[in-house]
Amino acid sequence: MSKKIKIGYFADGPWAHRAFEKIIRDETIEISFICVRYSKKDYVLQELGEKYKIDILSPQNINSSDFIYQIKKYKVDLFVSMSYDQIFKNELINLSPLKTINCHAGKLPYYRGRNILNWVLINDEKEFGITVHYMDEGIDTGDIILQKVYEITDEDTYATLLERAYEGCAEILYDAIKVIQYGKVRAIKQDDVDKIGIYCGGRREGDEILDWNQTSRDVFNFVRALCIPGPQALSFINGKPIKINKVKLVEGAHKYKGIPGQVIGKGKEGLYIKTQDSMIELIEYSFEGNIKISDRLSNRLDQTRNTISNI
């Protein structure tokens, strides 16, 4: 039997729940404490802590001298971060003998940062990655321990990628802990892969507004990147919001000039909407009222301009 490894688990959300379920089944891994987010309580992790008699911590500042003093008593071998929201500083990162690792749903050094599963779809990527890496004080810049890549097809949406990422993160995080436990890490410096990489900013309210002055392919990617359980793509008809959950590329659609966002006809499953280059079929949406041919889907700024120009 291999030597037991003690970890401190900094965690939040379904990503962390799936990984916990996998880790806890291994008798050679001891979770000494679970550190949950201060700003948003994770009741699932709290219940798991009670069930398995694991201390639950919720510090306002993980880098404070008080918290560092508090966790020293656990004498853990490795800190593990899974969807935790605070930035780790050097003192904390290097406090445990085997350092600190993080699981990131992105193919590092590409797609560092936030909301990666949305961005890979918006950018029309054909694959996405999950990476476990050592932490440093940069944003997802530490040495890579393990990485796995998954194919993206046109059938994929934010929902399907999210489900694969939940399971994939649990598997690769567990595997990384075992590699470290057995002393078989062959870390790769991210600079050896790409010295610049890609950084993604966090998305916020308002970013879901759809710009119809894009190609049909770009509109298709944007909508599937924001579908449920995301906020859904947002547009407006005569100032009234329409939430769009699914659109479909129209096979054989011709490229021609027109008015982007205009409702131009009825398809087999929904409405045809003009895009910058061709048309797209609106399949799943929520709107209070009827949508007529020649109605225009737009964003608020465009409608304001239209209103002013008509005065």
Image (tube, rainbow, N blue to C red):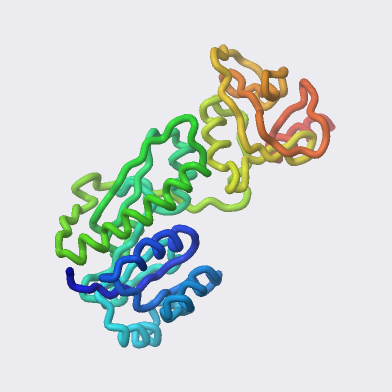
| Quadrant location of the C terminus in the rendered image | top right
Q: Residue at x 49, y 59 (%)?
A: 14
Q: Residue at x 62, y 43 (%)?
A: 232
- From this view, report whether residue 3 is shown above or below residue 277: below
127 left or right of 250 in image: left
Q: Is residue 130 left or right of residue 288?
A: left
Of 9 and 311, nearer the camera is: 9
Using the rendered image of the protein, determine whether residue 304 is visible from the camera's viewpoint. Answer: no
- Estimate the x, y position of residue 285 in percent, counting from the top left: 69, 36
Going 48% across and 47% down the picture, which residue do you hit? 162
Q: Position of residue 193 (x, y in %)?
A: 22, 45
Q: Residue 19: x percent and y percent?
A: 39, 61
Residue drawn at x 61%, y 20% as measured from the top left: 279
Q: Which picture quadrant has residue 91?
A: bottom left
Q: Is residue 225 above or below residue 81?
A: above
Q: Quadrant of residue 250?
A: top right
The foreground one among 202 and 283 is 283
Question: Is residue 259 toward the left or the right of residue 52 in the image?
Answer: right
* Residue 34 visible in the displayed image: yes
Residue 155 in picture, x, y percent from top left: 49, 31
- The answer to which quarter of the image holds residue 286 is top right
Query: For the N terminus, which image quadrant?
Result: bottom left
Left or right: where 296 falls relative to 186: right
Q: Number of labelled discs?
A: 0
Residue 229 versus residue 7 in the image, above or below: above
